[in-house]
Amino acid sequence: MLQVGFLPTLPSLLKAPNTPLIHRDLSWLQFNERVLAEARQATNPVLERIKFLAISSSNLDEFFMIRLAALGRSIGTVGKTDPAAARRLMQIRASILETVGKFVVRQSEALDVLSSELEAAGVFMVRTPKEGEQAYALGKRIFEEQIFPQLTAPEPFSVGKIGSLQNLQIAAVFQSQGPNRGNDRSNDVWFKIPRSLPSVYWMIEKSADGEQIFFFFLDDLLAMHLGTAFKLADPTLNPGFLRLTRDGDFTVDLEEEDTESIPEVVRTGLGSREKGRPVRLQYSGNFSEEFLSQCLRALRMVAGQVLYAPGTMNFHGLWSLFIQTPEALVAKSSMKYPPFASIMPKPFHTPKKLFEHLKQSDILLHHPYDSFDAFVAWIQAACADPDVTQVEVTIYRMDALSPIVDAMKGAAATKKVRAIIELRARFDELNNLRLAEELRKAGVEVAFGFGKLKLHAKIALITRIENGETKLYTHLSTGNYNAATARQYTDLAILTANPEIGQDARGFIDAVFKGQIPTSFKQLVSAPTRMHRKLLMHIQAETEAAQKGEKARIVAKVNALVDEGVIDHLYMASNAGVQVDLIVRGACSLIPGIKGLSENIRVISVVDRFLEHSRIYYFGHSNAMYLSSADWMPRNFFSRLEIAFPVLNANLYRYLEEIVIPAYLADTVKARELTPLGTWKKRSTASAKAQVTPPLKAIFKNQPPRSQFLFEELAKQEYRGTSLEKTTGPAGDPE
């Protein structure tokens, strides 16, 4: 079983006593446990494990900045009207902090194991001066050349100054530990370390055995060299480190703002992130209990929010080691998976002919197995096509140097080009502000998410004149138009010439440009107006079919499932006999397998080489399948501009129904299953065997089913299920 024994038992996982709902934040911690499990999985290549360790740390930083901060605000708000509910939230917070305290110990243990394995491959992690003269000399050189010039002289230290640290900033504190110190802190000094300094440093050295890498964490280099460099002669000064995490969320309601003022309003709001309330103080070193208690009081935090950081405060910096280790060394020691090459689907080999191809058939793209360059090539071809009169794209997260942006800027001189940019995409605000300014300067019309609604839908719409008629070509995606993340995230997209979908996309974009909420459409399902209700109706239709003894099935693949209305309807569907399969990467509040409540529901989670990001909603009785940008969360249903789009092409529908969905459900290598006790376990072969359809058998052969492996093989074969015939029409509607 996955190491969830360290997590709370089911009663303390629940959102409230005697309710069949796991609290979303505790469920999310279980997800991060699954990420860390990949770092501890000996069958993964060592640098892939390093990557997962780095991800687990970055995830935890964001969790404190967003989720724990929100929980603290909720406690304050709820406590004014419902003390009992506030006490329950405080219990949840205490459980979270206890869980995190144990989690970081396991991170440190994982690092120790990985350090030994890296050393065997010629990569040496240097933590102390005892690692050898050569390693120490290299570290000193790095410190003197790359770190010391960025530092300022030490300042007198007092606990009250900790609150001046920026978000995620480290400080080195030198406290006198002499026996006669008493309450005298006049010799205590500290250094506020610039956030611009890398978290990890490394250097390549030649040896008789080839290249060797020595890498150092920033806090280790500071501990070894800082006192000497600044001539802190007092031998009783003992270094320790602090790292402050602040509330990183900020809400910008644009209800009263006109379009021109929105960028400046968002830019101003960003400043609040550096002034957010402290939510965590990490420490390492020999700080006294008295000192830590003073920190709690000074920062107005509760016990547990001051957390010991075993190992290092810079696990997140290990990502650079994963990225930058020389390929020759990687290949020699098999430290990564073999290089992955995305496939350019055949229709995109000649982008100019894509419009003709789309008149005959929709195209499904499955990233990263299908190259994101396919979408880029289509946009570039459209921007260069003299018959194209209009290009429109929504932007939530986009790479900083995007060829899509370059193509749009170039096309703006001869075509109408429009972009809707969500300036409030968390942690991408500055990049999106820059993109908006850049596109506007080039003549692109730019609109933004408005009011309290964030634009999260992914739409690209091309208008083309053909023989005097206006034709619409639409690209709809579950993921961002971002070439960088498209190489690491799994997403699904459809390119179509379907006129109803094109008109729906046009209506959606036009509405947002007018600052209006998109409403009902012929094919697309939009939030915040209709998506939640539509999903409940589909679930209800499956429930009623099962009650009549007819076939009924629900499958959903999402990143998170926490909406209580959807969960209640899924419980009712299970009681009616509907077989429900849920593929939930992250937080899942639903509890499966409880007799009389959810015994017909199965929940799995896949954590593998690529981040699972696609969303699929499938309703067997209605013969309806949607792909979407939306998770099953209240924020997606009610606080975002989202779309779900139907799979109308029979072959693509069948491919998803009989290949993609079963591949996930058959996975026994990287999938974990949620138990009725609220814990996660490795799947047994027997539980997944029924999902291995004949086409899957032919591809897996004698290998244990692993979904991401299968999709990679399918991309190589250009296989899209085109030999399968659909006997019933897709995208039925319960209305």
Image (spheres, rainbow, N blue to C red):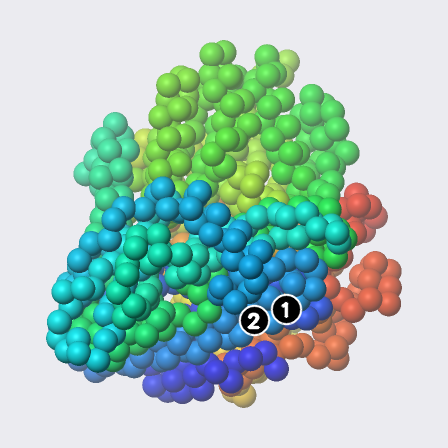
How many C-alpha atoms fall within 10 Å of the one at disc 2: few (<14), some, or many (≥20)? few
**680 shown above or below 234:** below
Eyeballing the image, is 529 above or below 31? above
Relative to 364, say whether 610 is above or below.
Answer: below
Q: Nearer the viewer, residue 268 or 11?
A: 268
Q: With 272 as the anchor, is 532 left or right in this view?
A: right
Task: Give the residue type at disc 1.
Answer: Ser
Mark 1 crowd level (few <14, some 14–19, many ≥20, 10 Å Cα): few
**Residue at the image point whose x is 41% and y is 24% from the top:** 439
**Frontmost residue, 250 versus 686:** 250
Instruction: Pinpoint residue 194: horizontal percent, then vertical percent.
Output: 33, 48
Q: Residue at x 75, y 52 (%)?
A: 208
- Residue 342, percent across and down? 71, 42
Q: Pointer 1 and pointer 2: residues touching (CB < 8 Å)?
A: yes
Residue shown at 24% from the left, 68% from the top: 175
Residue labelled with disc 2: 112
Q: Tell whether 679 sits left or right of 365.
A: left
Q: Is residue 49 visible?
A: yes
Which of the pair 278/392 is nearer the observer? 278
The residue indicated by pointer 1 is 116
The structure residue drawn at horizontal position 13% and vertical position 75%, both measured from the top left corner, is 183
